[in-house]
């Protein structure tokens, strides 16, 4: 047996050793599974730039050549952008054992790798959650369990409204994950600032978020910090709801299940909004990266 196949990039390794501000990023959102080219490359560049603008170091997680990677070396971005193999937390061991060439990490795999690497803050667009129709499908994203098992602050614009958001919040309550709203009272619905549901607690300052993680009762429970999409970028809620219903119907008719559901619904939604959802997606991801860098600075 070989040792745990984790490798930090030179820059990220040095930053972690110095206790400097580091923000982990997932890679599924930047791959073909998350956003169409060239928006995926733009999303990655904007998230990294937002983190660096605050003096923090971005750490993209991925599997490359069978290794768990935290932080990429120059020139490796293009391998992520072209990635097609989705790696959730449970797939990390398989990807290492089978030496996958490229695996793109979801939220669950990313918070696990951030934890292993000693990074306390992770930024994404939207987390996975409890799917609508869970009574029949049993489909609950592994992201939720991972938030409960790794001591990391996850910064997201809530979860996409194609999920069952009330049940997603109930699940997070059950597994003991605090759900905080960044200067906002409502749980965001990704493209819109409010889902009509309240967050558990509103927070105003990065120090409160960092202290909430530090005062966790269990050794390994994370925190979900939700950040609403900037007002100027918000989409029309009724319209997006209609498109979501169409995308979900298409997914059902095509008999899609398991890990393929989320990428399928995302791509249908993009097609049905004629790409109008993409600028909103980029703006909220960048905004989340910016807030995450502020939180990481409070930890540093
Ligand atoms: N939501 C998005 N874009 C994404 C995802 C979710 O708006 O790219 C990705 C994230 O990587 C998330 C994953 O962790 O989908 C959840 O997949 P699943 O529902 O199969 O757990
Ligand atoms: Mn699922």
Image (cartoon, rainbow, N blue to C red):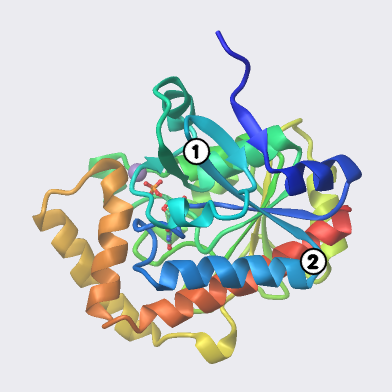
Q: Quadrant of residue 245?
A: bottom left
Q: Quadrant of residue 31?
A: bottom left
Q: Quadrant of residue 123?
A: bottom right
Of 45 and 29, the residue lying toward us: 45
Tell me: residue 253, above or below residue 192. Answer: above
Tell me: residue 283, above or below residue 129. Answer: below
Q: Earlier in the sequence, mark 1 or mark 2?
A: 1
Looking at the rendered structure, the number of numbered marks drawn on it comes to 2
Question: How far across and how far down the image is residue 87, in percent?
Answer: 43, 39
Question: How far across and how far down the image is residue 100, in percent?
Answer: 40, 32
Q: Is residue 136 left or right of residue 102?
A: left
Q: Residue at x 76, y 73 (%)?
A: 53
Of 265 and 170, the residue lying toward us: 265
Of 266 and 21, the residue lying toward us: 21
Name the residue at the front extreme: 75
Q: Residue at x 35, y 56 (%)?
A: 33
**Residue under numbered circle 2:** 294
Q: Residues within 10 Å of mark 2 (few under 14, many from 20)?
A: many
């Amino acid at each position: 047996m070989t040792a745990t196949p984790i490798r930090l990039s030179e820059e990220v390794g040095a930053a972690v050793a110095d206790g400097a501000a580091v923000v982990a990023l997932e890679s599924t959102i930047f791959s073909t599974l998350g956003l169409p080219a060239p928006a995926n490359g733009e999303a990655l560049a904007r998230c990294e730039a937002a983190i660096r603008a605050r003096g923090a170091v971005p750490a993209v997680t991925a599997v490359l050549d069978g290794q768990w990677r935290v932080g990429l070396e120059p020139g490796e971005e293009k391998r992520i952008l072209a990635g097609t193999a989705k790696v959730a937390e449970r797939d990390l061991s398989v990807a290492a054992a089978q030496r996958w060439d490229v695996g793109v990490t979801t939220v669950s795999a990313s918070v696990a790798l951030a934890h292993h690497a000693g990074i306390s803050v992770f930024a994404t667009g939207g987390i996975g959650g409890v799917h609508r129709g869970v009574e029949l499908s049993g489909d609950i994203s592994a992201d939720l369990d991972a938030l409960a098992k790794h001591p990391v602050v996850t910064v997201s614009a809530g979860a996409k409204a194609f999920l069952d958001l009330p049940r997603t919040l109930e699940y997070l309550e059950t597994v003991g994950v605090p759900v905080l709203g960044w200067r906002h009272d409502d749980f965001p619905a990704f493209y819109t600032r409010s889902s009509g549901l309240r967050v558990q607690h509103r927070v105003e300052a990065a120090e409160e978020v960092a202290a909430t993680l530090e005062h966790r009762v269990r050794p390994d429970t994370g925190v979900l910090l939700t950040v609403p999409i900037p007002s100027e970028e918000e989409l029309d809620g009724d319209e997006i709801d209609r498109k979501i219903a169409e995308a979900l119907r298409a997914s059902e008719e095509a008999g899609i299940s398991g890990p393929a559901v989320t990428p399928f619904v995302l791509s249908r939604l993009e097609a049905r909004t004629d790409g109008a959802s993409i600028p909103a997606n980029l703006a909220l991801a960048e905004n989340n990266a910016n807030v995450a860098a502020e939180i990481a600075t409070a930890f540093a």
